[in-house]
Image (cartoon, coloured by chain):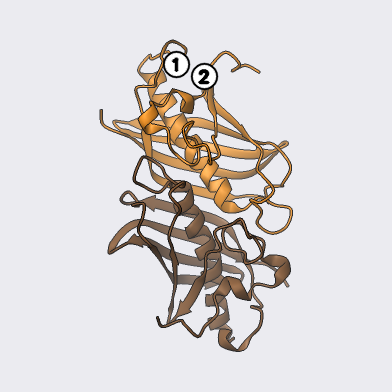
Chain colours: A brown, B orange
Amino acid sequence: MMHNKSKAIQDLYPDELAHCYGCGKNNLDGYQLKTYLVGDETIAHFLPDEKFTALPGSVYGGLVASLLDCHGTGSAAAFVCVQENINLNEVETIPVRCVTASLKVDFKAPTPMGVELKLRGKLQSIEGRKIWVDMTLSADDTICATGEILAIKIKD
Amino acid sequence: MMHNKSKAIQDLYPDELAHCYGCGKNNLDGYQLKTYLVGDETIAHFLPDEKFTALPGSVYGGLVASLLDCHGTGSAAAFVCVQENINLNEVETIPVRCVTASLKVDFKAPTPMGVELKLRGKLQSIEGRKIWVDMTLSADDTICATGEILAIKIKD
């Protein structure tokens, strides 16, 4: 995989900001989603446990939204770093942390259980501390959900 | 409380459709959110476990989105029943089940940990099998998030 040598964005969060249930490396109960910057997009993979079901055979929408939320804030932080010429391969902690102001999820097809899900993020725009990211969540080659996040960069 | 005698909407889902991690009575690992129809609105309460943290002291956005998603589909089913003059106190199972087509969450303030959260839902509109519901998620008297769901009634 292209990102073998890179650390995940979330693994670069400083320890005091790494407790998120969705993506914090210090939350041992959580999903520990890992987002990687690959070229000009972000990628994450996740295989849901069977307990996270909706109707039988499909993943519940709350998990889909959760993954898009954490992938979105991680992607936003990464895209700010790209804009500021910060090389994520050369830092121990990422100097940008974002929170979600708004998240929209459109469910396009049932998300099947038992398949590794792939999340992709692309920068839509940056205006000051506001970052908009467009995302997809796919199973095999089917887009199951799209997401749009407005993330806000936390002040230093 | 006004809804003591009523069953939760989710407890009226038929057994084969009651496995949702967010609100299914048959998912013993899940949140088991309970939505009640009270007058012309819907209400649910939820106290998050401390593991569902975001930044320390606050609830992670994925859980907020998950609760709004399940409260939204439950509310949509209830509002369809109201429109169709189905009295939920007189049925063993609810004859309407909805899934999420689209969910938008706006995060207005950090959702504090350790406080019972209150969700409220109001019908925005119904057009055929499409139901739009507006929601709030509050802690004490502060609205932490608003949600808008487009739910789709599953065909019989």
Tell me which residue sits at (46%, 32%) in the image.
B26
Q: Amino acid at mark 2?
A: Lys
Q: Is B128 in front, or is B6?
A: B6
Secondary structure beneath disc 2? loop
Q: Quadrant of the C terminus of chain A?
A: bottom right
Residue A25 location (% of width, % of height):
62, 67
Q: Residue at x 48, y 78 (%)?
A: A37
Q: Say whether marks 1 and 2 touch (CB < 8 Å).
A: yes
**Residue receiving disc 1:** B88
Point out residue A90 in the picture as x, y percentages from the top left corner: 60, 89
Residue occupying image coordinates x 51% and y 30%? B122
For disc 2, the marked residue is B7
Q: What type is the residue that disc 1 sits on? A: Leu
Does residue A76 sit above or below A7 in this rendering? above
Q: Position of residue B59 (x, y in %)?
A: 65, 50
The chain carrying label 2 is B
* Residue A104 left/right relative to A58: right
User: Could you say which quadrant of the image residue A77 lies in?
Assistant: bottom right
Q: Tell me which chain the residue with mark 1 is part of.
A: B
Instruction: Pick the residue in front: B78 or B125.
Output: B78
Q: Which of marks 2 and 1 precedes in the sequence?
A: 2
Residue at image location 50% in from the left, 71% down from the top: A35
Measured as percent of width and height from the top left, residue A148 is found at 45, 59
Mark 1 and mark 2: Cα distance apart in space: 8 Å
Callout 1: 10 Å neighbours few (<14), some, many (20+)? some
Position of B82 relative to A30 (above/below): above
Seen in the image, is A69 located left or right of residue A28?
left
Q: Is residue B39 left or right of residue B138?
A: left
Q: Secondary structure at mark 1?
A: helix
Q: Quadrant of residue B128?
A: top left
